[in-house]
Amino acid sequence: MAFEVLAIADDAAKRSLADVAYERIRDRLLMLDIKPGDLLNDDDLAKDLGVGRTPVREALKRLELDRLVVSYPRRGTFATRVEVTDLAFISEIRTQLEPLAASRAARVATDSMRERLRGVMRAVESFDTSTASAVETLRLDARVHQGIYAAAGNPHLEDVLIRYDNLAIRIWCVVLDRLPDLSRHVHEHEDLLRAVIDGDEALAAELARIHVSGFEHAVREALFAT
């Protein structure tokens, strides 16, 4: 019995370390701190993160499912390249699913979830894009979107949207220094969050659609500006 308890505790610890490794490697990939095409070395990552190789390997398997890394036999695991041509494909999916999540969240979110979204909205209202770093801005953006995904109460929809939001963030990072003004993009979230909190399904869906479309338009303008 004691052995079983220790085994269960050990498994839980491994899962926790794998989660930590996953989140930290994922963030480096999203922010392009790990450059597209870079080789990810198990030993180096394990030493850098202060964990064993097993959690790192488990994290890399999850990141491959997220399309953030790709593994080749006898060659290793590499950060996937940021293909700007994927922008249209990613936006096509998000334009359909982000409004679905927003309208569903407006309809089914629990009181506690709505209260959490109010906290996120206060963070957006007080956010100063003129002094914030790119990382802080992107983290706030992710906090808004992932809060709505969670409030929608559909774990399968949440999983898909997080994956494609992450891919969109990588493309955003490519052009971040060429975007003229992030304040409008950030503060668009206020009306979207308010619609979800107030239970206005139609408005929440429409604002989510406009937000995603605006993101694609801004990125395209930055990419093709002369």
Image: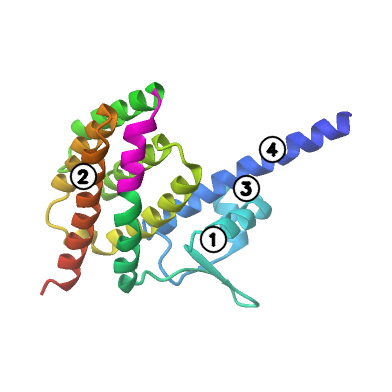
The residue pinned by badge 1 equals: 65
Residue at x 47% of width, y 70% of height: 38
Q: Residues within 10 Å of mark 4 (few under 14, many from 20)?
A: few
Camera-side mark, 3 or 4: 4
Report how far apart the C-alphas of labels 4 and 2 lie in the structure.
40 Å
Q: Is residue 74 above or below residue 97?
A: below
Question: Viewed as shown, does residue 85 lie left or right of 126?
Answer: right
Question: Magenta residues: mostly which secondary structure?
Answer: helix
Residue at x 31% of width, y 41% of height: 102
The residue pinned by badge 2 equals: 207
Camera-side mark, 4 or 1: 1
Question: What residue range appears in magenta?
Answer: 99-110
Q: Label 4: state its secondary structure.
A: helix
x and y percent of residue 147 in the render?
Answer: 37, 37
Amino acid marked by disc 1 = Leu
Report how far apart the C-alphas of labels 2 and 3 lie in the structure.
42 Å
In which quadrant is the C terminus drawn? bottom left
Question: Viewed as shown, does residue 20 lie left or right of 98?
Answer: right
In which quadrant is the N terminus drawn? top right
Camera-side mark, 4 or 2: 2
The residue pinned by badge 4 equals: 12
Which is nearer the N-term, disc 1 or disc 3? 3
Residue 131 seen in the figure:
no
Residue at x 16% of width, y 58% of height: 179
Which is nearer the N-term, disc 2 or disc 3? 3
The residue pinned by badge 3 equals: 51
Asked if the residue at tag 1 contacts the one at tag 2, i.e. Cβ–Cβ closer than 8 Å, the answer is: no
Camera-side mark, 1 or 3: 1
